[in-house]
Amino acid sequence: ILLATSISRPLEKGIILAEEAAMGNLDVTFFSNSTDEVGRLSAALNTMVGNIKKVVEEISAGAGKMVIASKKLTDESFQLSEGASEQA
């Protein structure tokens, strides 16, 4: 029973991390001092979630830049349109 518990509890933590990440919570971590398979799983899950979070942040930053550029382009287009209307 002790062996089963020592395996199932860390795996349950890994499952919780994966479920939280699947729901969009990318601030979760799974710490394990173990160097066995469970420890390796912990490290891999943490790395995976961290990398996903980094990609989401980069996409978000890029989207923000696109919004700014789009607004700038809209403003410039409007100014050109007004200038053309005044000349006509």
Image (cartoon, rainbow, N blue to C red):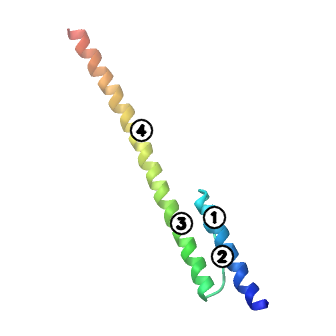
Identify the image quadrant of the N terminus: bottom right
Horizontal side of 33 relative to 45 (left or right) equals right
2 or 4: tag closer to the N-terminus:
2
Horizontal side of 76 relative to 55 (left or right) equals left
Q: Position of residue 43 (x, y in %)?
A: 57, 77
Horizontal side of 37 relative to 60 (left or right) equals right
Identify the image quadrant of the C terminus: top left
Q: Position of residue 42 (x, y in %)?
A: 60, 77
- Which residue position is annotated with label 4? 67
Examine the image and state in which quarter residue 39 appears.
Answer: bottom right
- Which residue position is annotated with label 1? 19
- Which residue position is annotated with label 2? 31
Badge 4 vs badge 1, beta-carbon distance below 8 Å = no
Residues packed near mark 2 inside 10 Å, few (<14), some (14 to 19) or many (20 plus): some
Q: Which of marks 1 and 2 is in front?
A: 1
Q: Which residue is drawn at 30% across and 25% down?
A: 77
- The disc placed on residue 50 is 3
Q: Residue at x 25, y 12 (%)?
A: 85
Callout 4 secondary element = helix
1 or 2: tag closer to the N-terminus:
1
Q: Is residue 59 above or below residue 47?
A: above
C-alpha gap between disc 2 and disc 4 = 38 Å
Amino acid under disc 4: Val
Amino acid under disc 3: Gly
Badge 1 vs badge 2, beta-carbon distance below 8 Å = no
Amino acid under disc 1: Glu
Q: Where is residue 25 in the image (x, y as percent from the top left)?
A: 61, 58
